[in-house]
Image: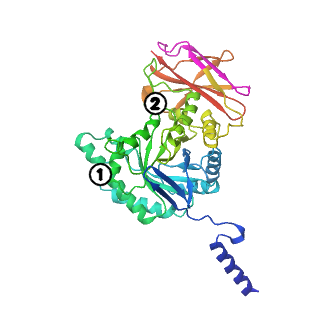
Amino acid sequence: MQHRRSKAVLACFAAFLLDVCLGAPLMAQSVVTVTGTQGNWQLNVNGQPDYIKGLDFGPSLSTNTQSQINAYVADLAATGANTTRTWGTSSDTAKLLTAVDQNNMRVVMGFWLNQNVNYCTDRTLGKTLNSIVGYVNQYKADPGVLMWDIGNEVILQAQNYFSGTTLQNDRVCYAQYVNQISQAIHAADPNHPTTSTDAWTGAWPYYATYSPDLDLLAVNQYGGVCTVQGSWQAGPTGNGVPYTKPYILTEFGPSGSWEVPNDENGVPLEPTDVQKAQAYPNAWACISGSNGNGAAGVSLGGTAFIYGNTNDFSGVWFNTEYSSAMTKRLSYYSIQQMYTGVPPTANQPPVIQSMTLSQTSGIAPGAAFTVTADFTDPEGDPMTYNIMLNEMYINGSSSLSNATFTQTGPDTFSVTAPKTAGVWKIYVYAFDNHNNVGIESASFAVQ
């Protein structure tokens, strides 16, 4: 009996190695390649054509449990996204990979590199490279790995720390360092491509010259997303000889605070929920080439910014969610329709029609002013409201605090101004009873 049992165990183990033990398939390491010819490239996963339809991952991997991460990724996957992206890779990335494997998704695995380092003189670069290779070896066999993304916005952001010859030299040294990392990654893992993200296609000539080992280019672009294909076509010298590698968008979405005009108080005019939601399909048309701009075969897709749920300055501007309860905003449903091609059938969030303040400047500290916020709910659901304030343009804080207010009518509120002078942001939240929210913002000056 013991002999027969041992033989059965061995047989089961052998079957496990063949992915069929007990009828449970063993998910194998993915093999990802970029194939094709100049201007006609294709991303392939396990020999099958693939196109990145992605959404960047915002929830904390360190503070959320595995079950919470599982829920977030399932919710993200419900948009039709097949890919997510990180900015850094650590021991906690295992949680994300576990979740994406359950949802047949993949990850653009980011490696954070400091933006304020002089890459010509820093003596810790070897240690950083070794750490990166260590994580590559740890995760390369996971089927959720799509590619390795080295650094984020370093070439552009270097201008905040260096100037003149030092700036130019640093950018060259950084691109050379990226190439060293790419070579080391390829040596450890020949089955996944490498790229490096910047926020400026002006960084691409550095990669073309000094990072030839990269398999593809990458860029974060918001308001300028539809100029990316033209930058690729213009090439490294701008003379119309294109780059010789395809690209992906690693962030795209509504125009950022650095791209929009200022309002009457001299601070960036935040787009409405409707404008933010529409920005995603508008950008996707340029990324995918569905608008006829010629991106097909050159752009291999992109990851939208961002599946996040923080309720702060940037979170309100960009997130698809409002809270850990996965309260949906209009952009979530817009992205879902963009990736699936199917109009959403779920209950939709309240939508702002207009918002006005009785005063936008000259408000005395502690004085009352009136906010009129005309929200409508597509299904006619009852709405409840909250109002919050932010002092980004006073002290740089991204946090929001609850305002003191009284609802005085169906869409009017009496709000007590803060006692601190300066330009404040005010946010009105309209919640339905189906876990959706609409948010509108404006600025006002306390003087």
Towards the viewer: 28 or 136: 28
Q: Are marks 2 and 1 in contact (CB under 8 Å)?
A: no
Q: Is residue 1 left or right of residue 77?
A: right
Q: Residues in magenta?
A: 354-383
Percent coordinates x, y for residue 62 in the rendering: 54, 51
Towards the viewer: 8 or 386: 8
Residue 440 lies, with reference to residue 62, above or below; the image says above
The verdict on residue 357 being magenta is yes
Q: Residue at (56%, 36%) from the top-left corner?
A: 281
Q: Quadrant of the C terminus?
A: top left
Residue 3 lies, with reference to residue 223, above or below; the image says below
Classify mark 2: helix, strand or loop.
loop
Q: Residue at (65%, 48%) from the top-left corner?
A: 74
Classify mark 1: helix, strand or loop.
helix
- Identity, as a three-letter code, of the amino acid under mark 1: Cys
Residue 397 lies, with reference to residue 54, above or below; the image says above
Q: Is residue 37 left or right of residue 285?
A: left
Label 1, on which residue?
173
Q: Earlier in the sequence, mark 2 or mark 1?
A: 1
Label 2, on which residue?
257
Give residue 104's quadrant in the image.
bottom right
Percent coordinates x, y for residue 364 in the rendering: 49, 13
Q: Residue at (56%, 53%) from the top-left corner?
A: 50
Give residue 241's quadrant in the image.
top left
**Whether residue 47 can be seen here:** yes
Q: Quadrant of the N terminus?
A: bottom right
